[in-house]
Image (spheres, helix red, strand yellow):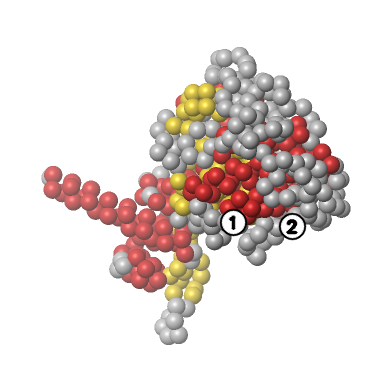
Amino acid sequence: MGDVMAQAVRHDAMRARNLALVLGELGARGALTRAALAEITGLTKTTVSKLVADLIEAGLVLEAGAVRDGERGRPGVAVRISGEHVAAVGLEINVDYLSVRVVDLARTVRLRRTQAVDNRSAQPVDVLARLRDLALQAVDEAVEAGLRVVGGVLAVPGPVDLATGTVHNAPNLGWRDVPVSSLLSMPFPMWVENEANLAALGELWFGRGLPDFLHVSGEIGIGAGLVVQGRLFRGARGFAGELGHVAVSPDGPACRCGGRGCLEQYAGQDALLAAAGGPVVRQHHAGAPGTPPSETPGAPPSATPGTLPSETPDAPPNQARGALPTEAPGAPPSATPGTLPSETPDAPPNQARGALPSETPGAPPSEARGTPPSATPGDRLEPGDQGVGWIVSRLLAGDEAALRACERAGWALGVALCSAINLVDPDAIVLGGIYAPLFPWIGGVVADMLASRLGQMRDGVPPVVVSHLGTEAAALGAAGQVIQRVIADPAAALQH
């Protein structure tokens, strides 16, 4: 009896591996015939046919029509991953919005829900309850459309213990050691992950698809995700990518993280708004569950975020500026940096751009130069991005303070990225989040900084390109992570 059971276990394990092998090839290559799958995987045609039949029955695969593999013989029937039955949910909590994306197994976005809300003034339990309501509404709509949600991932702006789903410290939310996984109850398996990491994965699976790049996610905080050979680099404890807390000026303003002169204080959304004379942003935060809102330890004093010290060792003196090129040196010719596809929901519309304000490479901005773009701002900016929407409207109007704020942010971002490039040597820099709509005014400054500071040590500087996903990247990456789990273990999905 023991030998029979052991043999059955081995058979099930082998079948699970083969199912994953077949589904993985369909995910990587697209539609294939059973004969092509047998040739690629090394499995027999009979085995492939049985596996495909199981995947079709489970709603993971469907037949896509007849194709002819060669000049002779009967045409084969191609199969591909099905988006008609299985779906994943990607959730995001950011400082000023909640986001839900429902994505089917074929990586088609089926539902988008975003709610603008100030999460800094709320308790974590209240934020999570509001997010749960928003997510369940989307899930109900997905079920009505015939989809079965098999799992979800939540993106949060801070380091996460992946084993427990605890957010150790999200300074812009005021969260410290918040047990998110235990507080968020959903009718399907849920995981919690860092927002910047998921934004990088979103760019990998739904964006440009570059195999090696550093994705910079600009919001009120600034995070980065490093993808190497198509895989996310997490670091020893999963905390890699805290670019927003790289010091660009050691004697600069105090940061909520406890340091001084962090990039976030010059290039985060609050810093940009303050420097441009924009709407005042409330600085109070919520603590752990049950704790009244209070000042976060290490919060900056009353100094205006984004103000460069006049005699900072790392900050070159202000000087007259020239004109910036309208795109980053070395940017791929396939897309114009700063232009977002019009069909992307929640993304700012394509707008005509004029000359970009610029500066001498390596120098912090003092006065904006150049002719402002003549286009008027669109009425569909990123949900939860009223702050950056205000900045874009001022930039399009040629407002000098807004232009200077963006040049200052580009300078600081360039300084931080020079260190990151020297350390990890990425093939490309992808700017996302609020930097997508701001790319025409920031991207060139960053590219010039990299060229001026890195050009003598390297035979080439990584191109600086814009993400087409905007602030949607993290939620898409979250849903994509669930999809990857299904593809890696379809046998589990077959059991439901």
* 381 sits left or right of 65 in the view: right
* Residue 379, quarter of the rendered image: top right
Give the answer, above or below, for where 4 lies relative to 280.
below
- Residue 182 against residue 67 in the figure, above or below: above
Mark 1 falls on what kind of element?
loop
Q: Nearer the viewer, residue 106 or 394?
A: 394
Instruction: Give the residue type at disc 2.
Output: Thr
The reply to whether the C-beta atoms of the residues labelled 2 and 1 are less than 8 Å apart is: no
Is 55 or 342 nearer to us in this picture?
342
Q: In this figure, which residue is indicated by the disc labeled 2?
A: 326
For the residues labelled 2 and 1, the Cα–Cα distance comes to 20 Å
In this rendering, the label closer to the viewer, 2 or 1: 1
Q: Residue at x 77, y 44 (%)?
A: 319
- Residue 496 appears at what percent x and percent y? 40, 44
Q: Nearer the viewer, residue 90 or 195?
A: 195
| Residue wearing tag 1 | 455
At horizontal 62% and vertical 22% (from top left) the residue drawn is: 299
Badge 2 marks a residue whose secondary structure is loop
**Crowd tier of the residue under label 2, counting other residues whose Cα lies within 10 Å: few below 14, some 14–19, many 20 or above:** many
Residue 26 image position (x, y, % from top left) = 45, 62
The reply, left or right, for residue 348 in relation to residue 264 is right
Which kind of residue does numbered mark 1 sit on?
Gly
Name the quadrant of the N terminus.
Answer: top left
Residue pictured at 54% horizontal, 37% vertical: 242
Evaluate whether residue 415 shows in this view. Answer: yes
Q: Position of residue 358 (x, y in %)?
A: 76, 50
N-terminal-most mark, 2 or 1: 2
**Quadrant location of residue 307?**
top right
